[in-house]
Image: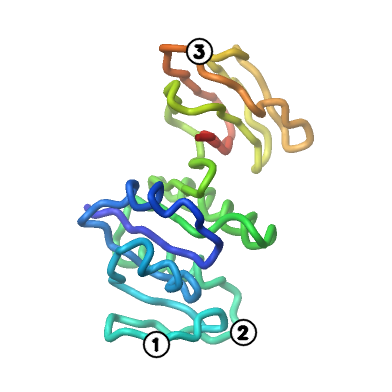
Amino acid sequence: MKRCVVVGGAKIENYDLIRNALRPDDFVIYCDGGLNHGKSLGAKPDLIVGDFDSYTGELTDDEIIVLPRKKDDTDTVFAVKEALRRGFEDFLLVGVTGQRLDHTIGNLSILLMLDSLHKTAKIIDDCSEMEIVSDKRAFVDDSFSYFSLLNISGTAKGITIKNAEYELENGQITCEYQYGISNEVLKGKTAEISLSEGRLLLIRVY
């Protein structure tokens, strides 16, 4: 199954980084102001969605879903739900973090939603890549400068971190005490992360 890439309207400065993450067979959905990234990303839209309160340019003849401005779902959430309806299992979100904190936090919640549905999902921005760690092990190689584990949902228990500067065995991280920030992979190693209960946001920092 092809991957769905959802492009939001948040600022992107390192287009090379995002372009290198794209695949020729990706199904690309542009959300409203995300269309401003289209030329720089060089990725043709397969679907465009939005209420068009942040994009005022010309629209193409591609498939477009025009949304009302008064709605519960943001344009990005709608795009993800539409992709789910079309059967996609793997997601990459770009242009969805930074600038407005409310939108950033809301878009991080999309990762939780997709994890609950047992889908694969990742967010990439200029500084990092983000995904949810729950019932599967996650890995971080030493090409990344740092990695952080943040709890954004309930309590995570039975956390194990191996091959890192700060290792952990059967640890617990709550939303109130975030001590899993700015860890480093041991040189020449690959860090391994697992947990027995709950979920964590893994942020790999370039």
Q: Residue at x 31, y 84 (%)?
A: 60
Q: Amino acid at mark 1?
A: Glu
Seen in the image, is 37 located left or right of residue 155?
left
Q: Amino acid at mark 3?
A: Leu
Which numbered mark, 3 or 1, is in the foreground of this view? 1
Q: Nearer the viewer, residue 154 or 70?
A: 70
Seen in the image, is 187 located left or right of residue 158?
left
Q: Furthest-right residue in view?
A: 176
Q: Residue at x 43, y 63 (%)?
A: 7
Which numbered mark, 3 or 2, is in the foreground of this view? 3
Query: Is residue 114 shown above or below 36?
Result: above
Q: How is the image coloured?
A: rainbow
Q: CA distance from mark 3 to mark 1?
A: 49 Å
Query: Is residue 152 shown above or below 139?
Result: below
In the rendered image, which residue does mark 1 sit on?
58
> Does label 1 or label 2 sit earlier along the sequence?
1
Determine the secondary structure under disc 1. Answer: loop
Q: CA distance from mark 3 to mark 2?
A: 49 Å
Seen in the image, is 120 located left or right of residue 178?
left
Determine the secondary structure under disc 3. Answer: loop
In the rendered image, which residue does mark 3 sit on?
186
In the rendered image, which residue does mark 2 sit on?
70
- Tell me the crowding category of disc 2: few under 14, some 14 to 19, or many 20 or more residues within 10 angstroms, Cα based: few
Which numbered mark, 1 or 2, is in the foreground of this view? 1
